[in-house]
């Protein structure tokens, strides 16, 4: 049997005979990694200290390098269990045993924290760690037993086909589940063979948590009546994934949809979203998933109502921090920026910073052709700043006489109302030089091939 950390609370592991031997699990893991086509480089392996993640770490360390995968161990200490520090130490020892880099972050949650809060905090911490080590992404140890629980839990919560599709090996580019097709018992065979230490989290047996109740009480009872219930639920997930994939393919093929996945994301409102029909609802829900918004049926109907009302600039809450706006014939989905950032100075001959969702770069360079639109321009040398529009501000557009209000220029460029207050304005002193992507002013224009400052703006 696998060994457990002696200082941590444990219970006897009750497992059926492994569906795969340790050797078969290694072979299948290599096949799975090849099929996923993971980009070579560093990958953060999320290791909780439990059996499944310890098995994943072992497999990644043994097999990953042959596929260009360099594992880095990432552990999140939720701070909920009194022994969490010992668990972190256990994971660190596994990293040291395998000669791998170890990263850890503590969330300091309390015992009353919900599963949702813990999961959200965990993924935020993992993504932060992944960025700090320039990892290609995050590997998690979700497996087939977890998938069964997920599908059943979502069915009980009333999820539609998209939710019943469950987890995918690489649904999002930064989170990959390379052992999703393995049973928990197959992963246990690797831990058992090597006698690896792991932590058995008591929270997994707490029926107060819905997933734990499903795992501990509901699924075993279902198996007594329906021995193949696991296979049935996995089949439900496969059918639901086909359903979801078909709608996503349709989203790419419908004429006139003009889908834009930037920030904000938008689609042409007409003709597909002009009426509240099953087709419109499914298309809009699929579009939401494409850009990361989980839209309930009530949210979808609120968004469609904006189109029917036909008043540009009207908005509706979509839930989970998202909002919809009907803007100049388009239906826009976005997360509002919230408080507008203070103005920033573009100092020095070379620099880079992020302001209000824009990546800004500048450097000394020979001036090219200055045009009215676009996200690249040249200005004469001198002090520059970037800030939000100020009420009443105007600029003289390049090649035109007279000065025009910034708000009117933003309207004409079809910038949604919600984005206008945080749109970047480049100034020299109080003079507006440029509205990136909207309008270049006639001020501070350098002569061609003369020394200048090049400005590049990119939505980040």
Image (cartoon, rainbow, N blue to C red):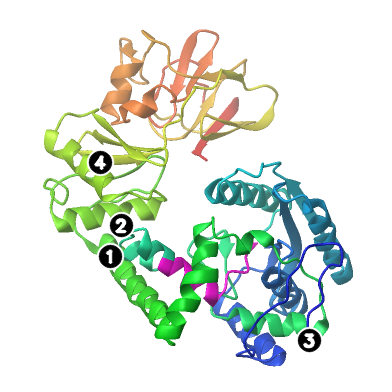
Read off the residue under disc 1. Answer: 247
Q: Position of residue 337 (x, y in %)?
A: 46, 30
The nearer-to-camera label among 3 and 4 is 3
Image coordinates of residue 386 in percent, x first then y, are 54, 21
Q: Which residue is mark 4?
A: 331
How packed is label 1: few (under 14 Cα within 10 Å), some, or many (20 or more)?
Answer: some
Q: Is residue 292 left or right of residue 364?
A: left
Majority SS type along the magenta span:
helix
| Displayed quadrant of residue 117 | top right
Q: Which sits earlier in the primary sequence, circle 1 or circle 4? A: 1
- Identify the secondary structure beneath mark 3: helix
Which residue is found at the position 25% from the left and 63% from the top? 253
Q: Which residues are magenta?
A: 138-152
Above or below residue 358? Residue 280 is below
Residue 60 falls in image quadrant? bottom right
Label 4's element? strand
> Residue beneath label 3, please?
193
> Is residue 148 covered in magenta?
yes
Answer yes or no: do the residues labelled 1 and 4 have beta carbons within 8 Å? no
**Disc nearest the viewer among 4 and 2:** 2
**How many residues crowd around disc 3 within 10 Å: few (fewer than 14), some, or many (20 or more)?**
few
Whether residue 29 can be seen here:
no
**In whole angstroms, how far apart are the C-alphas of marks 2 and 1?**
7 Å
**In the rendered structure, are the residues bearing label 2 and label 1 in contact, judged by CB atoms less than 8 Å apart?**
yes
Separation of disc 2 and disc 3 at Cα? 44 Å
Q: Is residue 38 visible?
A: yes
Q: CA distance from mark 1 to mark 3?
A: 44 Å
Observer-side mark, 2 or 3, equals: 3
Residue 286 tag number? 2
């Amino acid at each position: 049997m696998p060994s457990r950390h002696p200082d941590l609370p444990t219970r006897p592991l009750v497992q059926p005979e492994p569906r795969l031997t340790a050797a078969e699990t290694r072979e299948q893991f290599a096949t799975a990694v090849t099929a996923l086509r993971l980009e070579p480089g560093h990958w953060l392996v999320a290791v909780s200290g439990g059996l499944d993640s310890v098995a994943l770490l072992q497999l990644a360390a043994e097999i990953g390098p042959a596929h260009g995968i360099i594992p880095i161990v990432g552990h999140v200490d939720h701070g909920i269990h009194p022994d969490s520090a010992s668990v972190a130490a256990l994971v660190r020892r596994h990293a040291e045993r395998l000669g791998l880099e170890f990263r850890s972050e503590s969330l300091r949650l309390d015992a009353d924290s919900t599963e949702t809060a813990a999961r959200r905090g965990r993924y935020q911490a993992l993504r932060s760690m992944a960025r700090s080590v320039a990892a290609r992404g995050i590997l998690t140890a979700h497996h087939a037993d977890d998938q069964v629980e997920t599908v059943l839990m979502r069915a009980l919560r009333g999820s539609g086909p998209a939710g019943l599709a469950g987890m995918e090996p690489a649904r999002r580019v930064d989170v990959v589940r390379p052992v999703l097709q393995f049973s928990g018992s197959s992963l246990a065979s690797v831990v058992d063979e090597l006698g690896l230490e792991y932590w058995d989290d008591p929270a997994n047996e707490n029926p107060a948590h819905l997933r734990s109740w499903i795992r501990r009480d509901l699924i075993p009872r279902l198996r007594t009546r329906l021995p193949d219930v696991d296979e049935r639920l996995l089949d439900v997930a496969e059918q639901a994934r086909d359903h979801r994939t078909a709608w996503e393919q349709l989203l790419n093929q419908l004429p006139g949809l003009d889908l834009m996945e930037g920030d904000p994301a938008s689609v042409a409102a007409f003709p597909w979203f002009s009426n509240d029909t099953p087709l419109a609802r499914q298309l809009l829900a699929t579009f939401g998933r494409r850009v990361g918004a989980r839209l309930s049926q009530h949210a979808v109907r609120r968004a469609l109502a904006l189109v029917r009302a036909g008043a540009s600039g009207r908005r509706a809450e979509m839930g989970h921090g998202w909002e919809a706006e009907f803007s100049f014939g388009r239906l826009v989905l976005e997360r509002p920026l919230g408080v507008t950032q203070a103005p920033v100075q573009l100092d020095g001959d070379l620099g880079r910073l992020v302001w209000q969702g824009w990546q800004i770069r500048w450097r000394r360079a020979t001036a090219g052709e200055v045009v009215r639109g676009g996200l690249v321009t040249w200005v004469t040398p001198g002090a520059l700043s970037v800030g939000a529009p100020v009420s009443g501000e105007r600029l003289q557009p390049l090649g035109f006489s007279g000065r025009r209000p910034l708000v009117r220029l933003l309207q004409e460029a079809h910038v949604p109302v919600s984005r206008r207050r945080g749109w970047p304005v480049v100034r020299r002193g109080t003079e507006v030089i440029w509205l990136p992507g909207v309008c270049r002013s006639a001020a501070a224009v350098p002569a061609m091939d003369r020394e200048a400052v090049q400005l590049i703006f990119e939505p980040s």
